[in-house]
Amino acid sequence: MAKDRSDTINRLKRIEGQVRGVAQMVANDRYCIDILHQVQAVKAALAKVETAILKDHASCCVAEAIASGDAAEQRVKFNELVDLFDRVKR
């Protein structure tokens, strides 16, 4: 899990650099389509990080709630996921 966290932090640092690059492109009045391509790349990179964190949550937090047999904790984890997916739809 520590390696996964390290990988996620490294990805986020790369994304941070990409965002700074996009800001520089805007400041330099670069061609709009070029900027938009970079924005799309940032969004795709963030989506990958989101997927990795979601997988970690499911394999760790949700799995622990299921294994615990605690129905209340299971409902909490289930509702967290439902709320997350509901926000994505908006």
Image (cartoon, rainbow, N blue to C red):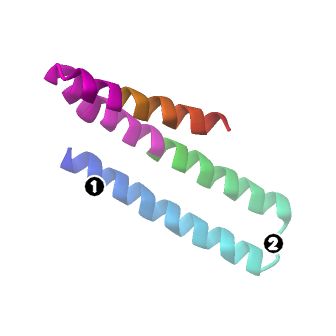
CB contact under 8 Å: marks 2 and 1: no
Q: Earlier in the sequence, mark 2 or mark 1?
A: 1
Q: Which residues are magenta?
A: 50-76
For the residue labelled by badge 1, is the local secondary structure a helix, a strand or a loop? Answer: helix
Q: Which residue is mark 2?
A: 30
Residue lying at the far front of the rendered structure: 72
- Disc number for residue 20: none
- Disc number for residue 6: 1
Residue lying at the far left of the rendered structure: 68
At 67% across and 68% down in the image, what residue appears? 22
Q: Position of residue 68 (x, y in %)?
A: 15, 24
Q: Is residue 71 left or right of residue 11?
A: left
How many residues crowd mark 2 within 10 Å: few (<14), some (14–19), many (20+)? few
At 59% across and 45% down in the image, what residue appears? 44
Q: Amino acid at mark 2?
A: Arg
How many numbered callouts? 2
At 26% across and 35% down in the image, what residue appears? 61
Q: Quadrant of the C terminus?
A: top right
Q: Position of residue 56 (x, y in %)?
A: 31, 37
Q: Is residue 16 left or right of residue 40?
A: left
How many residues crowd mark 1 within 10 Å: few (<14), some (14–19), many (20+)? few
Q: Nearer the viewer, mark 2 or mark 1?
A: 1
Q: Position of residue 65 (x, y in %)?
A: 22, 27
Q: Amino acid at mark 1?
A: Ser
At 32% across and 36% down in the image, what residue appears? 57
Q: Is residue 1 magenta?
A: no
Asked if residue 83 is positioned above or below residue 49 in the image, the reply reads above
Asked if residue 3 is positioned above or below residue 56 in the image, the reply reads below
Q: Main secondary structure of the magenta part?
A: helix
For the residue labelled by badge 2, is the local secondary structure a helix, a strand or a loop? Answer: loop
Asked if residue 31 is positioned above or below residue 78 in the image, the reply reads below
